[in-house]
Amino acid sequence: MHSITVRLNKAAREFAAGDSIGFQIRAGVQHYDRQSKQKEWTNYSAVIFAKAGAQADFYRSVLVEGGVVEVSGENIKVDVYEGQNGQSITLELLNARIGFAQSGQQQGKPQQQNSGKPSNQQSNQQEWDENPPF
């Protein structure tokens, strides 16, 4: 099992897949390469399938630009292709699943009610600093 947590730079690409709806996400994870002594990127892609209705609507609401998502896959497939800037390698998470997801529009902070008193509603969503760890 392989898992990544990323902030999406683009919304997922939605497509029909028989009785289901597919959502393809592409993201990169930055890491430090000790040999080159530079920051490098690992590119990932994953396709998540949903049934039409509530599940697909949920994915549409969280797989948006700025959304934070944890995606895991049972296996990894290496895709190598020639891009505009030369060879590009992407790791595809196979049989991908969503673990955690939060829309980029949500702030994770309690809202003030009209009375000026803090809301008693609590959120199970993780709050993020202005500079998240990824």
Image (cartoon, helix red, strand yellow):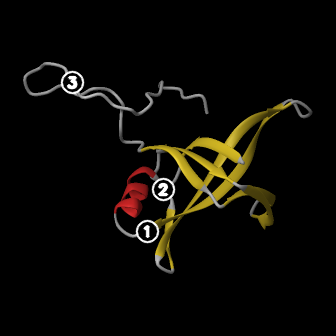
Say which of 49 and 7 sits in front.
Answer: 49
15 versus 83 height, above or below = below
Q: Amino acid at mark 1?
A: Lys
Q: Secondary structure at mark 3?
A: loop
Q: Position of residue 8 (x, y in %)?
A: 53, 47
Q: Quick check: 120 left or right of 115?
A: right
Q: CA distance from mark 3 to mark 2?
A: 32 Å
Residue at screen point 86% across, 29% down: 37
Q: Position of residue 29 (x, y in %)?
A: 68, 42
Residue 8 seen by the camera: no
Residue that numbered label 3 is attached to: 120
Q: Position of residue 64 (x, y in %)?
A: 45, 52
Q: CA distance from mark 3 to mark 1?
A: 34 Å
Residue at screen point 34% across, 66% down: 53
Q: Position of residue 48 (x, y in %)?
A: 55, 61
Q: Amino acid at mark 2?
A: Ala
Farthest left residue?
A: 115
Question: From the viewer's perspective, is the residue at label 1 or at label 2 nearer?
Answer: 1
In the figure, residue 25 lies in which quadrant?
Answer: bottom right
Q: Secondary structure at mark 2?
A: loop
Residue that numbered label 1 is attached to: 51
Q: Earlier in the sequence, mark 3 or mark 2?
A: 2
